[in-house]
Image (cartoon, grey):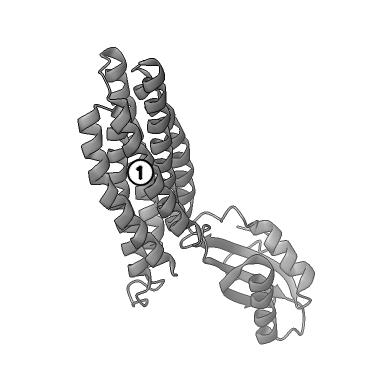
Amino acid sequence: MTDKRRVLIAALLTGGFMVVEAAGGLLTGSLALLADAGHMLTDSISLALAWYAFHLSERPATSSLSYGFDRVKTLVAYTNGLAIFAIAAWIVYEAALRLYRPEPVIAGPMLIVALAGLAVNLLAFYVLHGGDREGLNMRGAILHVVGDMLGSVGAIVAALIIMATGWYPVDPILSVLVAVILFRSAWSLVRDSGHLLLEGTPKSLDRDGIARDLVAHVPLVREVHHMHVWSLDGSKNIATLHACLREGADAHMAVSAIKERLAANHSIAHATVETEIDCCADAADHRLLH
C-alpha cells in the first residue's frame, strides 16, 4: 500500500468518526470528547492536505519548478505542526474555563464514545505506521493520529474516574495533559520541517564529515569545498559540491566515484559535482568549506 493511500484511509476514518465524537461530547458535556472531536476535525483536514501533497509530488518537474512538487510535503508538514499548536492552545483555554466553572459530565456514554474513538484511531495508526516514517509529511500525519489516540485515552481515563468518584474537574485536567504532549510533538514537527524549508542540512547527515569522507575514500579527489546538502521532504537528500582533483585525474571517473560514494554511504541520490584542477573559480581561498 502506498503512503498516499494510507493517508487517505486515515483521513476518511478520522473525518467519519469526528461527527460521532462531537455529538457524544455535546450530549455528555465532556470537554475531553469535544476537544478530541475538534482535534479530529482539524486532523481530517490536515490528513486530506497530506494526501494532496503526495498527489502533487507525483507530478513531473516543470521549467519553473525544476525540483517538482516534493517540497509541498514539507510545507504541509509545517502547516500541520502549526495547526496542532492551535488545537492544543484551544484545549488549554477551554480547560481553564471548565476548571473555573465545572460542568457535569455523563460518564457512561462518554466512556462508550471514547472507547470507540480509540478503536478508530488505533486502526488509522496501524494503517499509517506501515508507511515511510522518515518523511516529514507522513510524520505529520502520524502525529495527528497519535494526538487523537491520546485524546481518546484521556477521555477514557476521565470517564472512569468520574464514574468512580464523581470528580468532574478530572475531565479538563486530563485534556490539558494531552495538550502539553501535543505542544511538544508539534514543536518537533515545526522545527524539523522549518529546518528543511531553510535548506538546512538533514540531521542524519554531517556535511563536513561527508566532505572529509570523499577525500579519504575517492583517490582522485584532493579536496572538497563549497559543499551544500539539503532535502526536499526529509527523505530525498541532495548535494552540490566542488571537487578539486589530483594531477592527471580523469574528471568523468572522479564524478562517477563521488556520486557512487554519496549514494552508497550517505543516502544522497542526487548530487551536482563541479570539478577543478587547480584553484576554485568562486573563491580566492579554495581550501575553505563554505
Residue 86 shows in this picture: no
Is residue 216 toward the left or the right of residue 228 in the image? right
Name the residue type under label 1: Ala
Element at badge 1? helix
Closest to the observer: 153 or 10? Answer: 153
Q: Quadrant of residue 57?
A: bottom left
Q: Picture coordinates of residue 141 (x, y %)?
A: 40, 53
Choose top left, top right, bottom left or bottom right for residue 268. Answer: bottom right
- Mark 1 surroundings: few (<14), some (14-19) or many (≥20) residues within 10 A: some
Query: Where does label 1 land, which residue?
Result: 116
Quadrant where the N terminus sits is bottom left
Q: Locate residue 58, reporting x and y percent.
A: 37, 73
**In the image, is 231 to the left or to the right of 154?**
right
Instruction: Tell which of 149 and 39 is nearer to you.
Output: 149
Residue at position x 32%, y 51% from top? 14
Q: Quadrant of the C terminus?
A: bottom right
- Name the residue located 28 percent from the left edge and 48 percent from the top edge: 17
- Residue ranking furthest to the top: 100
Numbered disc total: 1
Whole-percent x and y of residue 100? 28, 13
Image height of 122 relative to 37, above or below? below
Q: Nearer the viewer, residue 235 or 222?
A: 235
**Horizontally, is 206 left or right of 4 in the view?**
right
Q: Position of residue 94 (x, y in %)?
A: 28, 25
Determine which quarter of the picture holds residue 212.
Answer: bottom right
Task: Identify the residue shown where x is 72% and y is 69%.
Answer: 214
